[in-house]
């Protein structure tokens, strides 16, 4: 029987135990990392991701994006204060009294950007869109993984934040242009809305590397948008020269038809009663005439109650009700016979 050359406390045995321990630790780390895996996307995030991936992301390129450690250098630049836009209520200009307009100033913090600050904001904005485009080019037509999807949404959030910051800083520019070129035939709210859309398009297309101020580029784009809105309104006026009037759109044909039918029916009943075509007795005629105000001699006779009619003919009001119901039944029979004698359209 061969004896083992390796004892239980030999260097080889100790190496083998350390190897088993390292394998166990690595397995434990993998299990912990799997428990900390990226959470799945919500429905809203899925919808936003699909919208981003519909077309390649546009951006204004810069040589700064391809320098070493570009992300760290760009986002370590100066942080620009966000403006306070709580004062921005352009649609209330014509609704507020003029005496209160002096009190409605810009109580919040306004920010005027220098050329360098604008360059910083546009670099951060376009670099985020540049990173989204890189991921899109890498994917091609493939679906992104969960990590790639999270990265796309993160860069989109950063780009959207800087886009809003630039637009909010220049909101006063839209109001100034709208008041300076205000057109009497176009609603002020429509004009401001068109200017805001032109401002957002200007943020997407502005190239800060050319050395111009953003306001110079945006003013031209906003004025062109106002001009297009004016031409669009002119063409609309040529096709529809009159304004929309809700009163002309509402038809009261059914009400008129109903009133005419009621009037014709009342006239027919009056004719039957006055000519006594229902063969009513004298007391029945008296009850009907007094109860419903039917009299050929008086234009507007009064409608008497059952008790008042009973005092005239000397009976109780309950007896008057019985006489009235009997007389009305005779009148209904006559009217139904008349309607049955009228030829219908199907008979012709």
Image (spheres, helix red, strand yellow):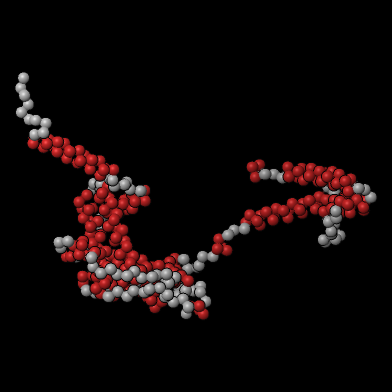
How many badges with numbers are in the image? 0
Counting from the top left corner in percent of width and height, residue 232 is at: 39, 67
Task: Say which quarter of the image contains residue 4.
Answer: top left
Identify the residue at horizontal 26%, vertical 72% (top origin).
117
In-image side of 98 versus 53 (left or right): right
* In the image, farthest residue toward the right: 314
Counting from the top left corner in percent of width and height, residue 271 is at: 80, 52
Identify the residue at horizontal 65%, vertical 56% (top origin).
255
Looking at the image, which is closer to me, 46 or 37? Answer: 37
Relative to 185, is 344 above or below? above
Looking at the image, which is closer to me, 238 or 155? Answer: 155
In-image side of 290 versus 55 (left or right): right
Give the position of the N terminus as an image quadrant: top left
Counting from the top left corner in percent of width and height, residue 266 is at: 76, 53
Identify the residue at horizontal 21%, vertical 70% (top origin).
209
Identify the residue at horizontal 17%, vertical 40% (top origin).
22
Relative to 45, is 113 above or below? below
């Amino acid at each position: 029987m061969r004896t083992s050359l390796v004892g239980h406390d030999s260097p080889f045995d100790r190496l083998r135990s350390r190897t088993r321990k390292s394998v166990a630790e690595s397995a434990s780390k993998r299990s912990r990392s799997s428990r900390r895996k990226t959470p799945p996307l919500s429905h809203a995030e899925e919808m936003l991701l699909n919208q981003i991936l519909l077309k390649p992301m546009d951006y204004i390129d810069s040589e700064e994006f391809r320098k070493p450690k570009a992300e760290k250098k760009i986002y370590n630049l100066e942080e620009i204060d966000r403006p306070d836009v709580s004062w921005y209520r352009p649609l209330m200009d014509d609704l507020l009294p003029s005496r209160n307009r002096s009190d409605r100033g810009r109580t919040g913090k306004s920010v005027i950007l220098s050329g360098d600050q604008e360059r910083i904001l546009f670099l951060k904005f376009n670099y985020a869109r540049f990173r989204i485009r890189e991921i899109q080019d890498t994917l091609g037509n493939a679906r992104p993984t969960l990590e790639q999807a999270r990265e796309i949404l993160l860069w989109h959030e950063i780009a959207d934040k800087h886009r809003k910051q630039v637009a909010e800083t220049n909101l006063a520019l839209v109001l100034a242009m709208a008041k300076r070129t205000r057109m009497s035939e176009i609603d002020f709210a429509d004009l401001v809305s068109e200017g805001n859309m032109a401002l957002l398009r200007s943020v997407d297309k502005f190239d800060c590397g050319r050395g111009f101020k953003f306001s110079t580029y945006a003013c031209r784009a906003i004025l062109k948008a106002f001009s297009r809105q004016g031409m669009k309104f002119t063409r609309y006026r040529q096709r529809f020269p009159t304004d929309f009037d809700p009163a002309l759109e509402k038809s009261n044909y059914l009400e008129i038809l109903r009133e005419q039918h009621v009037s014709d029916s009342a006239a027919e009943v009056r004719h039957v009663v006055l000519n006594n075509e229902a063969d009513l007795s004298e007391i029945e005629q008296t009850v009907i005439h007094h109860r419903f105000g039917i009299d050929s001699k008086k234009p507007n006779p009064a409608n008497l109650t059952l008790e008042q009619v009973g005092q005239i003919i000397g009976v109780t009001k309950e007896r008057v009700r019985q006489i009235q119901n009997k007389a009305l039944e005779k009148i209904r029979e006559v009217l139904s016979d008349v309607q049955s004698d009228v030829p219908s359209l199907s008979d012709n």
